Image (cartoon, grey):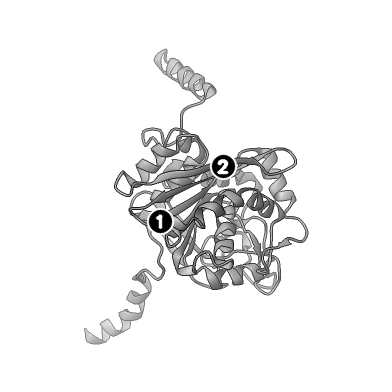
Amino acid sequence: MRSLLLLLLPLLSVSIPLGKQTGYDDAEARRLVKLAAAAYGERHVSCINKAFGNGENFHIENIEQKSCDHLDSTCASFTVVSENARRIIVVFRGTRSKSQLFLEGWQSVGTGIDFFDMGEVNRYFLNAHLVLWPEIEKVITNPRWANFDITFTGHSLGGALASLAAARTAKQGFRSGSQIKVYTFGQPRVGNVQFARNFDAILPNTYRVVFRRDIVPHMPACHKNQTFISEHEGGAKPCHAEHQDYYHHGTEIWYPDEMSAGAHYVECLGAPKNEDFGCSDRIKFFVDQSDTYTWDHRHYFGVKVPPYGKTGCDDLLPEGKPTVFENVVKRLNLLTRTIGLD
């Protein structure tokens, strides 16, 4: 029996998951996604109260919406402060239109722009950052809140802008890295390998939450290691960290199956660093499955992020309010069932 147990020990050790290896907090992410959703709508207070209740007594210090490209697409953010919790949260809105998404992709082509000697970043993201930054700086440098910790968050484009704001806050010495946390949802790649390495050196508490097959975290494309022989589906290739192309910063937190309470997630600390090929990078994406990838991008922690925020984070409407078209389809389906035509 003893010899049998010794033989089984290696197998048992493989199946037992390791304990938490990072400071990622699932409960905190579920609170912050409500604020990321709120940025898409106008009912910020309702979402804040749903996320934190009244105990921390957050108040909105500013709300911004400004044109951030030559098509007059807007970028937006809001900042909340809690004296009780001695904390500031800066929230950025994600992409709102197809034209804005097109420009984001277009401006990822070619070389990026230097970001405070940290490395190159996406031109669209940098321009949006510069448009929104002045009002944010006023809050985080206000003497009343000089020592408050700061959390930066956002969904999609909002995650990219949260990362740039956090990097600038640390780089310019407004806070130490230990006073800053970054939680993003479905965030695209922001800059090159040099930027990623410099970012990680000053901001260790950065978590990029990725749901299942969300495609946006895999855009813009990194430089793939074509010599790698893949055993994963479709022959996916890992990102190559030796090329100065787009590359992720921070730790990926991957939910590979679903995001209900207590759902399994992976702290992606494997190789290559920040682009762990054991996590979502191992997925090969196909054009004919784009609807699935888009669905995953819009849904985090059981809610459709943009419309959910517009409802004021009403948990009875996790998909947001039905559109007129959706209501018509629903009534037609009900009618056909009623008269026996389904």
Q: Write down the residue under mark 1.
A: 87
Which quadrant would the C terminus be assigned to in this image?
top left
Q: Nearer the viewer, residue 26 or 214?
A: 26
Q: Is residue 342 visible?
A: no
Q: Position of residue 58 (x, y in %)?
A: 38, 46
Q: Is residue 70 visible?
A: yes
Q: Write down the residue under mark 2.
A: 64
Work out which residue is located at the far right of the displayed protein and give it: 110
Name the quadrant containing residue 48: top left
Indicate which disc, 1 or 2, sits on the residue closer to the N terminus: 2
Mark 2 nearby-residue class (10 Å; few <14, some 14–19, many ≥20):
some
Name the quadrant containing residue 101: top right
Q: Nearer the viewer, residue 150 or 100?
A: 150
Q: Position of residue 200 (x, y in %)?
A: 55, 70
The kind of secondary structure element at disc 2 is strand
Q: Which residue lies at the image location 61% right of the left edge and 48% below the top edge?
A: 132
Work out which residue is located at the far top of the displayed protein and give it: 339
Distance from label 1 to label 2 (Cα)? 20 Å
Which amino acid is tagged 2? Glu
Q: Position of residue 283 (x, y in %)?
A: 57, 58
The kind of secondary structure element at disc 1 is strand
Image side of residue 2 versus residue 14, left or right: left
Which amino acid is tagged 1? Arg
Which quadrant would the N terminus be assigned to in this image?
bottom left
Work out which residue is located at the far bottom of the displayed protein and give it: 3
Q: Position of residue 16 (x, y in %)?
A: 34, 71
Q: Which residue lies at the image location 45% right of the left edge and 45% below the top edge?
A: 35
Mark 1 nearby-residue class (10 Å; few <14, some 14–19, many ≥20):
some
Name the quadrant containing residue 85: bottom left
Image side of residue 59 versus residue 122, left or right: left
Tally of marks: 2
Work out which residue is located at the far front of the displayed protein and give it: 143
